[in-house]
Image: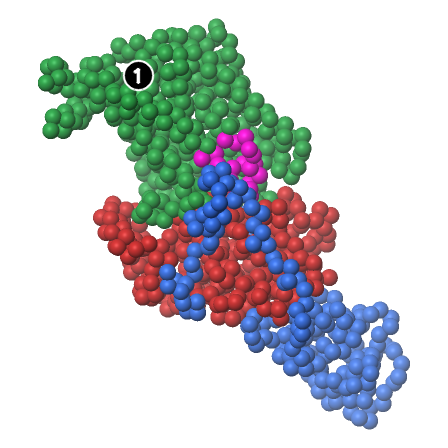
Amino acid sequence: MKRSPQRSVASGGPPGAGTWTGLALRLSPFPLLLLGLAACGQPHAESSLDPALFEDPPNLEYPDPGKLEVEPPPFSEGVFPCTDCHEPDLPVKGTPRKLTRAHQDIELHHGGENRWCLDCHSAVDFDKLHLAGGELIDFEESYRLCGQCHGDKYRDWRRGIHGRRSGHWDGEKTYLLCVHCHYSHAPAFKPLEPMPAPKPPVRTP
Amino acid sequence: MQTYKNFVGFVSGSLRIILRGGPLYWAWIVALLVMIGIGGYFYAEQLQHGLITTSMRDQCSWGLYIGNFTFLVGVAAAAVLLVVPAYVYHWGPIKEVAILGELLAVAAIAMCGLFVFVDIGHPERAWHLIPWFGRLNLPSSLLAWDVIVLNGYLVLNFVIVTYMLFRYFLGKKPNTSIFTPLVLFSIPCAIGIHTVTAFLYNGLPARPFWNTAILAPRFIASALCSGPAVLLVLMQILRRFTRFEIRDEAIWKIAELMAYFMGLNLFLLGAEVFKEYYSATEHLIHMQYMFTGVDGHTAIVPFMWLSVFCSIAAFLLFLIPATRRNVFTLNLGCLLIYLGVYLEKGMGLVIPGMTPDTLGEIYEYFPSRSEIAISAGIFSVGFLLFTLMVKVATPIMLGEFRARSAETGGA
Amino acid sequence: MSGCMTISRRDFMCAVAGCAAAASCSEPTHTPFFRDHLHELDEKQIEQLVADLEADYKDQYGVDIEVGTQGPREGVQFAYALDISRCIGCRRCVHACVEENNQSRDPEVQWIRVLEMDKARGIDFAHANAYYEAEKVPRDGHFYLPVACQHCADPPCVKSCPVNATWKEPDGIVVIDYDWCIGCRCCVSSCPYGARHFNWAEPEIPAEDINPKTHLLGNRPRHKGVVEKCTFCIQRTREGLYPACVEVCPVGARKFGNLLDPLSEIREVLRSKRIFVLKTELETHPRFFYFYGV
């Protein structure tokens, strides 16, 4: 059989198991009939997963999070840039309180009583967020902020096993930001309306 | 040359015999042809619309067709196994009994082939199953094995009966050095075809109901009840309408053996019932679906109890000497056995094996009108084939239909 | 098998073509009535086959459908992982799959089945429900287990197929040759995951809903009487794309990649999460892993 691994389905040869050769290989040292069954009864050791798949290979390097391709942040209509309203001379009040002049729609359900606006939003530059150490970051990098508390999720997300990725499994992919799925002020995932259920089979009379 | 002439005479004579018969014979033939016509009509519909005309769905993807197939493999196997006691006990006309068994086997296997044929979605691709032309997945696929053993068995039996009848036709005895080994060889083959057919189900661990070691023994035990039931009735008919001499003792002996096999069959069923109900694992649900229904799904429950009732009643009728010797209760027993095993194989094997399906869904399969009509059509083809073969075979065995050379002293 | 054998076989089959042709008057006209097994065709014959198929689809749907033949890539073993602590049972994957893979709308064929299960029972198929209706999901007290082809390393379907119409490709995708399948449904019986679906009637797909980007062994439109199933979106994944269900999942529960690439999502799941497979006891060795992300 010709093999041209790159281009054609013709190269997809039949499986080893299920052919005479496959069975004959397993059976070769034995009388056919009895041992045929014995061969079928092998617990398929060769198909079990290699234990090495479960271990960190040495020098495993994940892509630098700074270079991640992300969708733009999902701002509500007309709120960004924040500095349109939060002009430099707008005074900053340093205490948590009920907002009355703007952002009344925001109800904070994130981290109980211990959180307030300026934990995340910068009062120095309202178009930025700030990390605990004081570093100012863009909204595109908000995942770094989230990652300060949610370290395990951040790690999983960076490695592609938390949240959705789109694009290529073997190349360029786009990440969603945390806030695409988790509204930052109330991050619990919102229930969705399910799509239609399958139709149960109907008997022909 | 002489053999060729004789063979032409054999064929043309056979045709004449087939076309000769009383009103009862013709009524029977016409009835069968009508049934075949109806089945053919529904099959044409099925070809046009697809298997949607059946009640099979993904959840229960085998049904009446494959149930009938399984039942008839049993009939084919058992018909030949009857040869064993015929030899062992030196009963009456051994050769007649053996030939009838072989003929029944040929008809039954032909029906098996037809049932598989109507069950597949692409009958025009059935040639993929022919060794050399198609591409049989050996050694791993059991259906591939089944195709081989069933066709081999068909050829074997066809060769045996043709050879024997042709020899009698020539007024000669079959050459025992050819004939006896072939007949003896057909006995393990008979067990083989039913075992491979059982393995077809047995080898599916995805379906725990079938994944039981006593499935093949159960198949053989039940087959050894249903196959002879057909022959017993036939032997009585032949005895009445022809000069066949079949002694009562032979019939009684077969009935007695059937009682033992039915006892074995019931015992194996009991073992299965115990295992499922006592251990009560998640696999129990299939047997529950069979005997009590699950969540109000009870479509096949009455049939299963009817099957158990028929089997037990027939067992008792054949076990008690007085009732197996009485013509009425003997034939009643045959009917009960046939019905009991037919329901057990035709419905009680396939449907509960697939209900609930592998993801736990219960879809209540029950054959559609079209499936029943097509199945009846196939049975009619089988009966027609069997009738015609017996019609030709009988006068040959009785020495009434002979080659001209044989009549003139074998020139 | 030798070429000589192939030719004599075709001659033989053509001789009996006449009787069988009557049975299939509604069938395609360009593709040959009799064809050899795909593994016996050379590249030229496959090219011809693809051209014939495309012409047939054009006749049937009036759409230009591209039938791809992209082969497996060296060093790639596909695997899938699904986070059942995230899945909310919204069935977006089911319907995205139907559209991507040209599944019949009527009668309905769906390669993915989302099972609703009771938290109190754990994974228990006997009490699973695929037909749940709800205003919003997830429903309290329930979790969701989507099931499709598990692309087993030891696939019982491949084992049971009497005519080699289904096989495992070198990159791990279990595929079906729809032109070779005889429709005996042995594979449906042997699949422990209900993943194989038979076309009980001629599939119906509105022409405007056809996905024209197809693969010979994947989502090209099927006819009645053959079995079909998930192919890991072979038409996408062999091009490097994620399967449609991965792209659509709103909770990112679905992970796909190359088992042999240490940086793939799949390997990360294997390393950092505890995985399980369905019906371990059957030793089918699925390449479809379930895991708990939290």
The answer to which image quadrant residue C271 occupies is bottom right
The residue that appears at 25% across and 20% down in the rendered structure is B174
> Left or right: C154 with respect to B77?
right
The residue that appears at 41% across and 63% down in the rendered structure is A11
Element under label 1?
A: helix
Q: Judge the density around disc 1: few (<14), some (14-19), many (≥20) Cα neighbours within 10 Å.
A: some
Which amino acid, by three-letter code, is at mark 1? Answer: Glu
What are the residue bounds of the magenta stretch? Answer: B196-216
| Chain of the residue that carries numbered disc 1 in the rendered image | B
Q: According to the colouring, which chain is blue?
A: A
Decide if residue C271 is in sight here.
yes
Residue B329 is inside the magenta segment? no
Q: According to the colouring, which chain is green?
A: B
Q: Mark 1 = which residue?
A: B96
Q: Is residue A86 above or below residue B247?
A: below
Q: Quadrant of the C terminus of chain A?
A: top left
Q: According to the colouring, which chain is red?
A: C
> Left or right: B2 with respect to A148?
left
The residue that appears at 28% across and 11% down in the rendered structure is B244
Q: Quadrant of the N terminus of chain A?
A: bottom left
